[in-house]
C-alpha cells in the first residue's frame, strides 16, 4: 500500500486547509490498473500529460516562440523528460525583472545601466 499525503485549500474559504492521505495501491501500473481499472488509469495519465504540455506551451509562448516552433517542441515532447526551450532572451529577462521592480529600484537600475554603458564606451 502506498499512502500519499495530500493537502488542499481553496481561495474561496479563507484559512481552510485539508490534510489527509490517499491510497494509491503501491503506485505500480499493474496494481493501480487492478484497483482502479485501465480506463481510469489511462484517463488520469492523459489528463496529466495534457496539463504538462499546456505548461510547456505557456513557457514557449512567454519565450516568444512561434506556433510552428511550439508544435515542433510538442512533437518531440516525452512525459517525465525535461524539455529545453533554448536559451532565454537576455533582454526579455531583464525587461521582465525591470517591470517587477519598484519605481525607486527602476530609477537606480537605469542609473547603474547608464554608468556601465558609459564605462564600456570609454574603454
Image: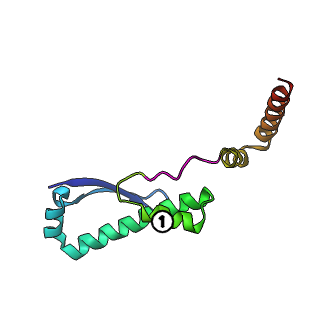
Residue designated by label 1: 54
| Viewer-closest of 97 and 70 | 70
35 sits to left or right of 84: left
Membership of 70 in magenta stretch:
no
| Viewer-closest of 83 and 103 | 83
Q: Main secondary structure of the magenta part?
A: loop
Residue found at x 79% / y 34%: 113
Tell me the SS state at disc 1.
helix
106 sits to left or right of 70: right
Task: Tell me: residue 122, above or below residue 47.
Answer: above
| Viewer-closest of 19 and 37 | 37
| Viewer-closest of 103 and 76 | 76
Which quadrant holds residue 3?
A: bottom left
77 sits to left or right of 33: right
Toward the bottom, the furthest residue is 39
Q: Which range of residues does the magenta coloring cover?
A: 83-89
Which quadrant holds residue 67?
A: bottom right
Q: Position of residue 30 (x, y in %)?
A: 14, 63
Residue found at x 49% / y 60%: 56
Q: Position of residue 82 (x, y in %)?
A: 41, 51
Residue neighbourhood size for the residue with mark 1, other residues' Cα within 10 Å, grouped as few (<14), some (14–19), many (≥20): few
Q: Position of residue 77 (x, y in %)?
A: 41, 60
Task: Tell me: residue 46, above or below residue 6.
Answer: below
Membership of 85 in magenta stretch:
yes
Question: How are the colours assigned in the image?
Answer: rainbow
Residue found at x 61% / y 58%: 62
Which quadrant holds residue 40?
A: bottom left
Task: Tell me: residue 82, above or below residue 77.
Answer: above
Amino acid at each position: 500500500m502506498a499512502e500519499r499525503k495530500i493537502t488542499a485549500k481553496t481561495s474561496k474559504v479563507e484559512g481552510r486547509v485539508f490534510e489527509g492521505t490517499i491510497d494509491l495501491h503501491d503506485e505500480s501500473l499493474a496494481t493501480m490498473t487492478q484497483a482502479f481499472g485501465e480506463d481510469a488509469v489511462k484517463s488520469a495519465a492523459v489528463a496529466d500529460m495534457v496539463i504538462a504540455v499546456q505548461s510547456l506551451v505557456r513557457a514557449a509562448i512567454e519565450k516568444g516562440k512561434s506556433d510552428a516552433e511550439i508544435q515542433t517542441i510538442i512533437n518531440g515532447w516525452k512525459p517525465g523528460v525535461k524539455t529545453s526551450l533554448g536559451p532565454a532572451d537576455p533582454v526579455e529577462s531583464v525587461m521582465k525583472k525591470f517591470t517587477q521592480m519598484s519605481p525607486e529600484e527602476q530609477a537606480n537600475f537605469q542609473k547603474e545601466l547608464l554608468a556601465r554603458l558609459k564605462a564600456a564606451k570609454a574603454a
